[in-house]
Every structure is written in structure tokens, then in C-alpha cells.
């Protein structure tokens, strides 16, 4: 009955029933995900330039990643509200702001202006996930949305690969300015592509009161007291700390303590991007076979081991193997995290607010992980005999350790949560 009704309303709701049309929109949105992943991966590429030209410390370099992620997380909820009001045009404005931030960074010569550039990039990039999810929910038929989300999610790994394989050559030819000008060009190109998509340009229909800040804040406040969602948030924080921390510091580690050139180290770390693309597919399959809670627990536990071993294993290839395994698992658990949200909220209408809450809590991992890593390098040193990187990777491993504990509790409580839900349904 509901399926038939949904199918009958597809045309009125503006759904793309054509497979090619739905895939084309998802592909377009995927490139915005690529843009964000490129932005997250920039600091290892321009690190030497910034340190040699401006004498920035490791903690200052790390904070340039952290401040991007701070703006990225804080902007997500306001941008989700803007999507309800203005639809995909919010995305066009966001990527143009991203491009402005890239230009500001390219022509900066002081740390304060570098921070301004990264904040503008982060605010612009914060439009991508909430606006893209909003667009896909309103314009792609429900039976096509799983495929669309799969296409969209591959953009993260693809962006890492693109950044670490292509941009080191750009940096070698034109320095940090060329890298950020190329990044600005990506933003402008995406804005033009988005403007050509009618479903991105169009307003999205909304119910009265749906777009108010008060309504959104009420939903966020409600989901923030959900204990199982808080456990999921701890897991998600662990994942994001590894995603950002490993990409920010592994090329420098290979350069400082394993003798690789920074360009070669960046190329090898690009394997993380490939691993993440494969991990998303493998995680979805594993979730279907063994369940979400099992994937979360096993994924976080192995991620913990791989991260802790990275600075301890000898040679070059074992480090890359540890980092690639950790990167693979960050995206392998991602479908289970997102798929668990509808299972634990009190009603379906809270899924969006719960997803926004998870994105906001990412701050704890994405802000502190790379920044404190840099402080540890400044404190304990970066040379072959120094202990800075050991301390840094053990700091990163703390996040999946907490995530593993949270996943174990999440798995242990799922039966009681299921029994409570069944009892509640019976009373209703």
C-alpha cells in the first residue's frame, strides 16, 4: 500500500524515475564529495612549503587541518536548514565560497589569513553532505536511493586518490599557491556543473514550519539524549579521527622516519583512498551478512590494532599496509554507522536530526586528532630517533579504542533495545 502510494506520488514529488537521470545526479553530487576529500588531504602536500617559507610549527600545520574540520562540522546543521529553504542552490553557493577560501589561502602570507582561507573552505564544504542527502531524498525515487548513495559515497576515496596522486606534482611545479588555485578551479567548475542540473537549481517543496530553526533544534535536542545514538557517536568520532589524522601525518612520517620523499610518501598514502572505496563496498556486504553491530565491533577493533602498529613496524611497506588497513576499515564501518541511525531513533522523522548530530560530534575527532598529533611532534621530535610519531599514532589509536568499547556496549544492548521496541509496539 505504502509502496504503491509512493510510486504514484513520484512524479508529483519530482523523483527521477529514469535510471540514467538518477545516476547522473548522484554522479554529480559525488564530485562534491571528491572536492571535500581533496580539501582534507591538502596539508601533507603543502607542509614543506609552509614550513620553509613561513617557519610554521607542526602544531600550526596540524591546526590548519583542524580548523577546516571545525568549520566543516559547525556548518552542517545550518546548511541542512538552508537546504530545506533553498534546495540545491545552497550547494552552488557553498562551492563558490569554497573556491573563495582556496583563493584566499593561495595569496596569503600570514598564519591568520591561512586560517581564514581554511575556515571559508570548511564552511563551503559543509554544504555537501546535508544538501546532497536532502536532494537525493527529494528527487530520487526510494527504490533508486541505495544505488545513488553508493555512487555518492565513493567520492571520498576518489578525492583522496586524486589529491595525493596529482597535487604533489602541482606543488612541485608551482608551490602551495598553485595547489590552492587548482583547488579553487575545482570549486568553480563544480558550481557550473551544479548550475546545469535542474534538480539542483530548483526549489524543494516543504511543509509549513519544516524549515524553521526552532523545529530543527527541537529534533537535535531530542536525539542528543538517545543513549544508543551517543554510543554510535563515539564510534563515528573514532572513525573520523583516523580518517583525518592518518591522512594529515602519514606522508610526513614516511618522509621523516622512513626516508621517503614527501611526494613518494603522498603517492603511497593514496592507497588509503583506493582502500576506502573498496571498504565501502565490503562493509555494506558484511553488514548484510553479519549485522551492523558485528561490523562495528570488528571494524573498530582491527582499526585500533592497525593504527597502533603503524609507527612500530619496521621498514616502509609494513607502514603502508597498516595505514591502508586502517583506511579500508574507516569506510567499511561507515554503512553500518549510517544504517544504524534509523534503527535507534524514536521515529523516522528524527533520522535527519540524528545524522546532523553525528556530524557535529565529529568535531571531537577531526579537531583534536591532527592538532594534538602536531603538538606531540613539537614536544617529542620528528627525527629518526625521536618519539614524536610514536606518541602521535598512539594518540590516534586512543580514538578507535574508545570506539571499540562503545561498539561492544552497542552490541550488548541491542537485544534489550529490540525487546523494548517490541514491547512499545505491542502497547501501541
Image (cartoon, rainbow, N blue to C red):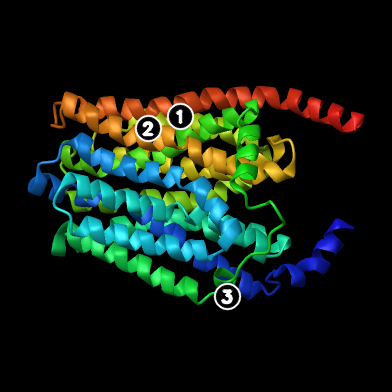
Q: Would you identify the image quadrant in which residue 410 lies?
A: top right
| Crowding near the residue tagged with mark 1, few <14, some 14–19, many ≥20 C-alpha atoms within 10 Å | many
Q: In the image, 361: left or right of 320? A: right
N-terminal-most mark, 1 or 3: 3
| Crowding near the residue tagged with mark 3, few <14, some 14–19, many ≥20 C-alpha atoms within 10 Å | few
Q: Which residue is mark 1?
A: 400
Expressed as whole percent of the image width and height from the top left, the position of residue 348 reads 73, 44
CB atoms of marks 3 and 2 within 8 Å: no
At horizontal 62% and vertical 48% (from top left) the residue drawn is: 285
Expressed as whole percent of the image width and height from the top left, the position of residue 151 reads 55, 61
Q: CA distance from mark 3 to mark 2?
A: 44 Å
Front in this rendered view, residue 298 or 72: 72
Residue 45, above or below 220: below
CB atoms of marks 1 and 3 within 8 Å: no
State which mark lies toward you, 1 or 2: 1
At horizontal 42% and vertical 74% (from top left) the residue drawn is: 192
Residue 381, above or below 316: above
Q: In the image, 22: left or right of 360? A: right
Expressed as whole percent of the image width and height from the top left, the position of residue 315 reads 23, 37
Expressed as whole percent of the image width and height from the top left, the position of residue 98 reads 36, 59
Q: Which residue is mark 2?
A: 307
State which mark lies toward you, 1 or 3: 3
Residue 263 got which mark? none
Front in this rendered view, residue 230 or 87: 87
CB atoms of marks 1 and 2 within 8 Å: yes
At horizontal 58% and vertical 28% (from top left) the residue drawn is: 231
Q: In the image, 349: left or right of 50? A: right
Q: CA distance from mark 1 to mark 2?
A: 9 Å
Q: How many marks?
A: 3
Q: Which residue is mark 3?
A: 198
Amino acid at each position: 500500500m505504502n509502496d504503491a502510494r509512493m510510486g504514484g506520488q513520484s512524479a508529483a514529488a519530482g523523483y527521477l524515475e529514469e535510471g540514467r537521470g538518477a545516476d547522473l545526479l548522484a554522479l554529480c553530487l559525488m564530485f562534491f564529495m571528491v572536492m571535500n576529500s581533496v580539501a582534507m588531504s591538502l596539508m601533507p602536500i603543502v607542509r614543506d612549503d609552509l614550513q620553509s617559507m613561513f617557519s610554521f610549527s607542526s602544531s600550526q600545520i596540524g591546526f590548519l587541518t583542524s580548523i577546516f574540520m571545525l568549520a566543516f562540522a559547525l556548518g552542517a546543521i545550518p546548511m541542512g536548514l538552508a537546504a530545506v529553504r533553498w534546495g540545491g542552490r545552497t550547494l552552488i553557493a557553498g562551492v563558490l565560497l569554497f573556491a573563495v577560501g582556496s583563493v584566499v589561502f593561495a595569496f596569503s602570507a600570514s598564519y591568520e589569513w591561512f586560517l581564514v582561507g581554511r575556515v571559508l573552505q570548511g564552511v563551503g564544504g559543509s554544504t555537501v553532505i546535508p544538501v546532497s542527502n536532502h536532494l537525493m531524498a527529494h528527487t530520487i525515487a526510494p527504490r533508486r536511493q541505495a544505488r545513488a548513495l553508493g555512487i555518492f559515497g565513493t567520492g571520498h576515496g576518489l578525492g583522496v586518490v586524486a589529491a595525493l596522486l596529482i597535487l604533489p606534482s602541482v606543488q612541485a611545479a608551482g608551490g602551495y599557491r598553485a595547489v590552492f588555485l587548482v583547488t579553487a578551479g575545482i570549486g568553480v567548475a563544480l558550481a557550473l556543473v551544479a548550475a546545469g542540473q535542474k534538480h539542483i537549481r530548483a526549489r524543494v517543496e516543504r511543509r509549513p514550519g519544516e524549515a524553521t530553526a526552532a523545529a530543527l533544534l527541537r529534533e537535535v535536542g531530542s536525539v542528543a539524549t538517545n543513549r544508543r545514538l551517543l554510543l554510535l557517536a563515539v564510534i563515528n568520532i573514532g572513525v573520523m579521527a583516523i580518517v583525518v589524522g592518518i591522512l594529515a601525518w602519514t606522508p610526513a612520517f614516511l618522509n621523516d622516519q622512513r626516508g621517503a620523499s614527501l611526494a613518494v610518501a603522498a603517492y603511497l598514502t593514496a592507497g588509503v583512498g583506493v582502500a576506502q572505496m573498496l571498504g565501502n563496498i565490503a562493509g555494506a556486504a558484511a553488514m548484510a551478512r553479519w549485522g551492523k553491530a558485528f561490523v562495528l565491533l570488528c571494524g573498530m577493533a582491527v582499526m585500533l590494532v592497525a593504527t597502533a602498529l603503524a609507527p612500530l613496524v619496521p621498514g616502509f611497506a609494513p607502514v603502508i599496509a597498516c595505514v591502508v588497513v586502517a583506511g579500508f576499515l574507516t569506510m567499511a564501518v561507515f554503512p553500518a554507522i549510517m544504517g544504524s541511525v534509523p534503527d535507534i531513533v524514536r521515529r523516522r522523522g528524527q533520522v535527519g536530526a540524528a545524522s546532523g548530530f553525528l556530524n557535529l560530534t565529529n568535531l571531537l575527532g577531526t579537531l583534536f586528532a591532527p592538532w594534538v598529533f602536531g603538538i606531540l611532534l613539537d614536544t617529542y621530535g620528528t627525527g629518526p630517533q625521536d618519539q614524536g610519531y610514536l606518541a602521535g599514532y598512539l594518540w590516534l589509536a586512543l580514538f578507535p579504542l574508545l570506539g571499540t568499547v562503545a561498539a561492544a556496549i552497542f552490541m550488548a544492548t541491542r537485544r534489550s533495545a529490540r525487546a523494548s521496541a517490541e514491547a512499545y509496539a505491542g502497547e501501541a
